Image: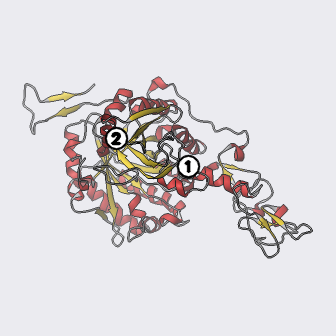
Amino acid sequence: MPYLLKFLLIWFLASQSVGESALQSGSDGGDYTCSKIKKCLLGCCGLLDNMGNGICGLGPEFCGPGCTSSCDQKSECDPGWGIQWSKASTCPLNVCCSRYGFCGTTSDFCGGLVVSSPQCDISTNSSNQRTVGYYEGWNWQRSCGKMTPQQIPLGYYTHINFAFSLIDPSTYRLTSMDDTTGLLYQAVSGLKRRQPGLQVWLAVGGWAMNDPGKFRTVFSRLAASPLAQDTFFESLVTFLELNDFDGVDIDWEYPVADDRGGIPADFENYVLLLSRLRARLNNMGRPMGLSVTLPASYWYLRGFDIINLEPHVDWYNVMTYDIHGVWDSTIKSLGPSAHAHTNLTEINEALELLWRNNINPARVNLGLGFYGRSFTMSDPNCMAAGCPFKSGGHAGTCTGIPGILSAAEITKIIADGAKVTLDPVAAVQIVTWDQDQWVSWDDTKTLTMKLQYANKRCLGGLMVWAIDLDDGTLIKSLAEAGSSRHLAFDDLPDTFPCFGPIGNISAT
């Protein structure tokens, strides 16, 4: 599970609007005129006027008889002019095909069509079925703000996903991120003795695994080779049994995406990989879980065959955070403006991609960020959402990365006198301090809003990134918001006496 998602839902919505306007009026500032020698950057050059100039467009009007140049261009989808003029008859993920042949989700593409979203009574608390927390096994590398397995707060999470294990690019066997992280597996699974019913799963992959380097194409090659899969499965099964783990979360970021090392064949091969993995786990002699992480962006989600993956997984962990960050400055239609990275309006738009494909909401976990995306603002007199920023916020004392602050660091900043302002539409708190520092995050009030939203949409659970970024504040806030609590023991003795007290018990 990454912090960084470079292309998010808002990126897609913005960029697709640019593509649409390019063929209508060039309103994004580009030049979309053409001629016999001046080819189109996008589309085909249609009939020329008496000055020898034409307009770029798609479909038979521009690419058919009378086309002047770039005549082999095809639209993303077929709005009704015929498949011979289009790359595909429909859009990925069942998003809308505009009359200009572009795929999108806004009213410009869909007209009056509205997505049918799941509706439940909030009081049913559907999301109380599970709370999955990711534990960053490498957090020991931080200079401060570390969390050992023994310090993980119990009684709140139903599942702990240990992040991450990698896949060796030569042998296709599991390999640890580093020697120290690899020593922590059994310490985390040992927490099950203190919280009855707790499950501990292994998260395999993560954002960094698909960064440039030796691991970049491992998932693609694994998904394409049943022989490599068999080796991986046996390595995984051995690990799960040896370390008393209860399941595996596959975090491939991302299939098909060429900027992340993916190839087109990943779309079908991922289904093959997951179907064979599910069959192998079913033969282990005890129930074993299987989940997949999903991005909150159309750009990356379109590489997942979510309809045919669903029957093989227990649930999807949807990364509904990192919707904004310093990378917005490189997006022409957004620019360097500060926005909340857990904006609830945009989260809803992301989940509508699932509802377009009839994904069962009971198999969906809403991602919550136990950290904030921060900015150094350009003008101390403009500190609201939408105001310009000049760089990422100052690096935190413990996390040490500009543009991101852990919940533990934010709570200290607030305690030192920072200003906190609620954005009720985005359902986030905006924290400002030191004249030019800005960060968005969630507290009890906004977590309540997100929890109610999850219950309203009939979601089966919540997912947290990451357990160790919290100082206990946010997980307690989540419980105060209505998330379920679970029986847990403090200082459980190694053996139980026949009679008498067996230690302190915490539960609600």
- Label 1 sits on a secondary structure element that is helix
- Label 2 sits on a secondary structure element that is helix
Query: So how many labels did they put on this image?
Result: 2
Specify the color scheme. Answer: secondary structure
Residue 167, horizontal then vertical, whole percent: 35, 64
Is residue 157 something that shows in the picture?
no
The residue sitting at 38% across, 49% down in the picture is: 404
Q: Amino acid at mark 2?
A: Ile
Residue 410 is marked as 2
Q: Does residue 96 appear left or right of residue 457 in this picture?
A: right
Looking at the rendering, in which quadrant would you find the C terminus?
A: top left
Residue 334, horizontal then vertical, whole percent: 58, 51
Is the residue under label 1 in contact with that under label 2 (CB below 8 Å)?
no
Identify the residue under disc 1. 9
Rendered position, 129 above or below 64: above
> How many angstroms separate mark 2 from mark 1 (CA)?
26 Å
Residue 219, quarter of picture: bottom left
Q: Does residue 209 appear left or right of residue 386 in this picture?
A: left
Q: Amino acid at mark 1?
A: Leu
The residue sitting at 58% across, 45% down in the picture is: 353
The residue sitting at 34% across, 40% down in the picture is: 410
